[in-house]
Image: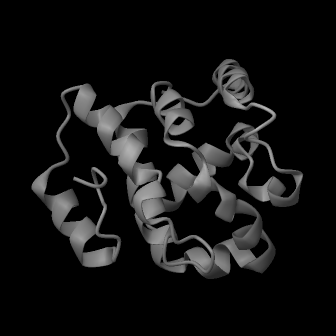
Amino acid sequence: MALNSSTLYTLFGLVTSLMTPESWDPRTESSDATLVSEPGLLQRLIDFDRQDQLAQLDPLLGDDETQRLAGLMKIDHSVWRNIAETLDDDELTHLIRFFAIAEKLPGWEAGAESPVIPLAKVLRTRGVRLDKTLLTWLREFSENRFLPYGPL
């Protein structure tokens, strides 16, 4: 599924409807769920994996972008589940791989809050199991013991 303007509008609506005055903290604007509504951002993250650039994330993002986007790792799982519903299985798999590697960036550590968890759960509810290759890859490249399905 391509991320067109209609999809982005839907994402923005989902994100803003899930935000409450209690969940918004102006001091942590970069962790705000509105980050995912930035035009082209999700596609850019997906493309890092599609273009086999995960090993170069740190220099590709740069310090400012790394710090600004670190808030993606703290977005509530319910927001990620809603976003995942708008994406196809292939896009979800690319995002899983992106976030697993991104967790090695400074300030991106997420543990049980990792976006990988709700993305993998959405795939599972669709009847799509993570294949052995991806599970082995996650174990090899991620130190997060909660991946892919969260705390047991």
Q: Looking at this view, is 140 or 73 the one in front? A: 73
Name which residue lies at 39% across and 42% down: 119
Residue 72: x, y in percent? Answer: 62, 54
Name which residue lies at 33% across and 77% down: 143
Q: How is the image coloured?
A: one colour
* Horizontal side, residue 105 vs residue 131: left or right: right
Rendered image quadrant of residue 83:
top right
* Horizontal side, residue 74 vs residue 39: left or right: left
Rendered image quadrant of residue 62:
bottom right
Outermost residue toward the right? 26
Name which residue lies at 66% across and 20% down: 10
Residue 148: x, y in percent? Answer: 28, 55
* Horizontal side, residue 131 vs residue 47: left or right: left
Q: How many numbered discs sit on the rendered protein?
A: 0
Location of residue 68 with respect to 129 vertically, above or below: below
Residue 25: x, y in percent? Answer: 82, 50
Location of residue 17 with respect to 47 vertically, above or below: above
Does residue 50 appear in this view? Answer: no
Location of residue 14 with respect to 95 vertically, above or below: above
Q: Looking at this view, is 142 or 152 the one in front? A: 152
Rendered image quadrant of residue 85:
top left
Outermost residue toward the front? 22
* Horizontal side, residue 91 vs residue 146: left or right: right
Q: Looking at this view, is 20 or 45 the one in front? A: 20
Name which residue lies at 36% across and 40% down: 90
Residue 131: x, y in percent? Answer: 15, 50
Does residue 145 appear in this view? Answer: yes
Q: Looking at this view, is 102 or 75 the one in front? A: 75
